[in-house]
Amino acid sequence: MSAIFFILFGGLAIGCAVSMIVQRNPLYSAISLIGVLISLACIYVTLAAPFIAAVQVIVYAGAIMVLVVFVIMLLNVEEEERRSLRLRYLVPAAIFLAAVLVAEVTFIISTVDDSRIQQTHPSVSSNPSDVGLTASIGTHLFTQYLLPFEITSLLLLMAIVGAMTLARRASFTSPNVRVVPGAAVLPRHLIDPDAVADATPVEANTTAEAERLLGLEGAPHAREEN
Amino acid sequence: MDWNFILGIILQFVAITVAFTVVLMIVAYTVLAERRVLAFIQGRLGPNRVGYGGVLQPFADLLKFILKEEIVPDKSTKFVYFLAPIVAITTALMPLIVYPFGPTLTLPFLGEISLVVARFDVGLLYVLGVTSVGVYGIALAGWSSNNKYSLMGGLRSAAQLISYELSLGLALIGVILISGTLDLSSIVEQQSGWYGMRWNIFFQPIGFIIYLISAIAETNRVPFDLPEAETELVAGFHTEYSALKFALFFMAEYVNMFTVSMLAATLFLGGWNGPFISVLPWLGPIYFLGKVIFFLFLYIWIRGTLPRFRFDQLMNFGWKFLLPVAILNIILTATLALLGWI
Amino acid sequence: MVPQLSWYLALSAVLFTIGVVGVIVKRNVIAMFMCIELMLNAVNLTFVAFSSYFREVSGQLFVFIVMTVAAAEAAVGLGIIIAIFRNRESLDVDEANILKL
């Protein structure tokens, strides 16, 4: 029974992965990757790791891939065009190496028998694995592995700040000056491209004052945000 | 192959079929109830011609949806266009299997049957995970229709869903802290006794309010239904869908409403608990469905009463008010649980 | 017959290889990013398989941390991709071969 689940979900994962690299439209690649993630979550359930399976669906398939799909839709990414191969001698080499991989996998699955040196399958009913239950993971996460947990939260904070900084519209090279009162001192040649590069700073308390100082009173303003 | 195993699988399929049939019937009549109750709130009568008082209206609607002409936009990406309603309805129906409809009944001939289809360790996380994947139905529908109203509506709706998913999950953490388990059946069993004073709504009032508001936003209902309101964006992400695919989206929205109402009834109002439950356990499903119908009525009542939020007001409210309040609720609950008061 | 541990490791190796092929072959930078995520998932599968077969919890905890790191990397990486797109108007990595915009 476990073998049927493994073959089913493993085949689904490999099929979706191959589809992901074959598709030219990036949205179809994203949908194939979501298929891979959900089949891997099903494999985790058969391996008696239900918490990791649920977290995989919530975090990977439900949040990270939503972000990727949003970016694909917002940037209106087009399909890749076909281009002719320039290194044609690599194609037989690739086929040979793929055959080697298939041979290795077949050898592993058919010949290797490690049932005498390892414990039983995690979902077998006589000795089921209980390390995957939420209580077990929660206990270890907050006692033995507390330091990686806290460092991970710091990493997430860094990622939030980094993502917000990157996605903000930087208007340093546009004629519109957005000056945060009392915070920024900008060299003039970054804002006015005709100005000679000099290091005398321009300080202003409001945007109107900065525009008056720079002689840009008539410049169109960026969209006002409330 | 042992026959017990195969019999178990067949019984599971029967249980799933029964659960889905019951839920789909209730959802069909929720549509009718919404139209009638909304009509009474607005001072008119609503559909009352088909059958006595309009009871056969859902079947008339279903017939209309099946017989309508399917119009598929020419420049749409066909695969994604057909995939989106399937994703929407599948992820709307999948959480139904973890809800406990009643306590374990002991029937005279069949022995004990449990009224929950699948009981496993991470039931609540499963519901949250499936709801997260449900965002794709809307985003892909908006994109694949090749229509700027659909795209705007789809992206806005998806952004709203992922924003309010956070407060939804955080509001439920308070309940998990009190119960100590993610299994929905255990949470309901821990709320029994003491004449209903152990329902989680008394221990988590702030969490309940946050959950209710997030649930209304999650199902794209008024006052959070700007992405699909008729006067704003034609019809949002399902503008270009007709006939049966539109029926799937429509049903998916009502099944979602039903799912979050069931979650509210299970986690906060004690599920199948009620008076005389220990002597007459078959009253369990009746109490449970009564509480769920109360929440559905609350949804319809709110729809008839409140105006809708603008999209930036909606996002402001979700991120700047609801999320900090949910986090404060977790801190408060954790402190009280550590002190032993809860 | 019951799946052995080596079966899961073989599946993980195949998925990892497909991810590497994708990173090399694809020219769209978002598709390359998704192939990197596939490689991370293949490694996650190895961790979970070992953790379940040897009844050790540390494998699954590491998967938890790998997922968190992948989420952080996705956020910052897609921010960088958006910034590149704003400046170059193209997501083709073969065309982004000089430092000047």
Image: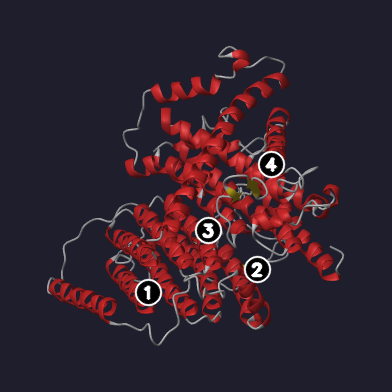
Quadrant position of the N terminus of chain C in the picture: bottom left
**Element under label 2?**
loop
- Pointers 3 and 2 within a single chain: yes
How many neighbours does mark 1 have within 10 angstroms: few (below 14), some (14-19), or many (20 or more)? many
- Numbered tag placed on residue C8 in the rendering: 1
Instruction: Give the CA separation, mark 4 to mark 3.
Output: 40 Å
**Label 3: which secondary element:** helix
Res B189 → quadrant: bottom right
Q: Amino acid at mark 2?
A: Val
> Which quadrant of the structure image shows residue B148?
top left
- At label 4, the amino acid type is Trp
Crowd band around label 4 with a 10 angstrom C-alpha radius: few (<14), some (14–19), many (20+) = some
- Let me know if marks 2 and 1 both belong to one chain: no
Above or below — where is C10 with respect to B184? below
Residue B73: x %, y % from top left: 35, 32
- Mark pair 1, 4: CA separation: 46 Å
Circles 1 and 3 on the same chain: no
User: Which label was assigned to residue A185?
Assistant: 2
**Residue A18, quarter of picture:** bottom left
Q: Which residue is mark 3?
A: A63
Q: Which chain does the residue under circle 2 lie in?
A: A
Q: Is residue A107 above or below residue B278?
A: below
